[in-house]
Amino acid sequence: MKIALIGFGTVGQGFVEVLALKQQFLQNKYDLNLNLVSIADIKYGSILDPAGIVPVKVLNHFRKHGNLFDFPTQIRPEDSFRAIKQSGADIIIEATPTNLKTAQPAIDHIRLAFELGKNVVTCNKGPVALFYPELKALAQKKQLAFKFESTVMSGSPIINTALYSLKGCEFKKIRGIMNGTTNFILTQMEAGQHYAEVLTEAQRLGYAETDPSGDVDGWDTLAKVVILANVVFGGQIKMADVKRKGITGLSLEDIQNGLKKGFRWKLIGEISLTENGLSAKVEPQMVPLDHPLAMVMGTSNAISFTTDLLGEVTITGAGAGRKETAFGVLNDIINIAQSKA
Ligand code: HSE
C-alpha cells in the first residue's frame, strides 16, 4: 500500500512517528507493507519518492532542520495537489489543519483524491462536518474507502463502533464529552488553575486546535456533533442547525459551587432523535458526580450511545493527542488495506 501524507503538522508528524514504530510489526503480523511515498506541507515543503521515504530518516531531518526543504528526495512536488497527482499512492491521508468554515484546502484534496481513484483517510473535521453526504457518495460511486475515525475522540473507536459493532441497533441518543482541550481545562480549573494558563499548556501539549477558540467556544464539539448526526443517524444537519455554547463563561467559582452541590461542569455534545427529527446541541452541563461522564477527567473523552437493543453503550478513551490521533489514522489504513487485499 502506497501512502501519501498531506499535512505535516502535529498529526502528520505523529503519523510518521507511529509508522516508524509500527512498520515492522504490521509487516510481521498482517503481512502489510505500508510504503510512505510522499509528504506535502505548505509550510515545511514537499517530498516524493516512489521507492518509499524512510520514516526515521525524515523525522531526524525534520527535528534537525525544522523543515523538509533539503531532505534528499526523488521528486519535489510544487504543491499538495501535485503531490496527490504524482504520488501513485493508493491512500491519501488528509491531515491539514481543520477549517470549519470552508473545509479548505482539505475538501479539494479529498475531491481530487477520489477523482483520481484514491482511497482517503482523514483526521480533519472540516470536510466531514461540512461535506459528508457529498464525499460519501463520491467514494461509493468509485468504490473507494473514505475513513475518518480520528475526527471524533482521536483514535478511540467511536465511528467504527457505531458503524460496525452496533450495526443492528437503532440509535436514540448520542451524548458525551467530545473535546480533550476543554475537558483538560475544566479538570485543571477544578484544581484551582486559571483558564488562560491551562489553555497555554493544552496548546503546548498539542491538544488544542490551531485556533484554540475552536475548542473553548465549542466549535470543535459542534463539528463532532454534526459528524455523528450525519454519519451515525444518517442526518443532513448543518453546523448552523446546532445550538452552541462554550466554556469561556465558566469561572473557578462556578466550578467550586457545582461541586458543593454534587455536580461537575462538563462541555457536552448531544444529539437526540425526537418526534420532530434530529435535535443537536453543545453546552456546558452540570453532570451529577456519580454519573459516568462526571468521572472522565483530563484530555480523556467519553461518548454514550443510547440504543434500542443494547441500552447505553459508553466508550471512554483518549479525546485528543498527537500519537492518539495518528493511531486512528493508522487503524483506518490497516482496515482499508485488509479490505482491499
Ligand atoms: N482540539 C481537539 C480536542 C483535538 O481538544 O479535542 C481533537 O479533535
Image (cartoon, grey):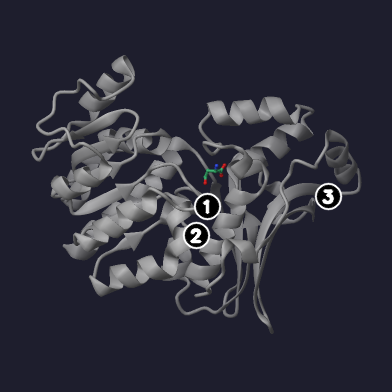
Give x and y (percent) for residue 313: 58, 65
Q: Residue at x 20, y 44 (%)?
A: 82
The residue furthest top is 64
Query: Mark 3 falls on what kind of element?
Result: strand
- Which residue is labeled 1 in the image? 101
Front-most of residues 176 and 28: 176
Ligand 1's quadrant: top right
79 in relation to 103, above or below? above
Instruction: Estimate how packed mark 1 is, as few (under 14), some (14 to 19) or many (20 or more) residues with alpha carbons within 10 Å.
Output: few
Check contact, mark 3 vs mark 1: CB within 8 A.
Answer: no
Q: Can you tell me whether the CB of the residue at mark 1 lies under 8 Å from the nearest atom of ligand 1?
A: no
Instruction: Give the foreground label among 1 and 2.
Output: 1
Instruction: Estimate how packed mark 2 is, as few (under 14), some (14 to 19) or many (20 or more) residues with alpha carbons within 10 Å.
Output: many
The number of discs equals 3
Q: Residue at x 23, y 70 (%)?
A: 142
Residue type marked 2: Ala
- Mark 1 or mark 2: name the one nearer the start of the chain: 1
Give x and y (percent) for residue 141: 26, 74
Residue type marked 1: Lys
Q: Is residue 158 visible?
A: no
Dividing the picture into quadrants, the one containing residue 292 is bottom right
Instruction: Give the foreground label among 3 and 1.
Output: 1
Dividing the picture into quadrants, the one containing residue 110 is bottom left
- Which residue is labeled 3 in the image? 263
- Which residue is labeled 2 in the image? 129
272 left or right, relative to 255: left
Image quadrant occupied by the C terminus: bottom left
Residue type marked 3: Phe
Using the numbered discs, state the Cα–Cα distance from disc 2 to disc 3 in whole angstroms. 31 Å
Query: Mark 2 falls on what kind of element?
Result: helix
Q: Residue at x 34, y 35 (%)?
A: 8
- Mark 2 or mark 3: name the one nearer the start of the chain: 2
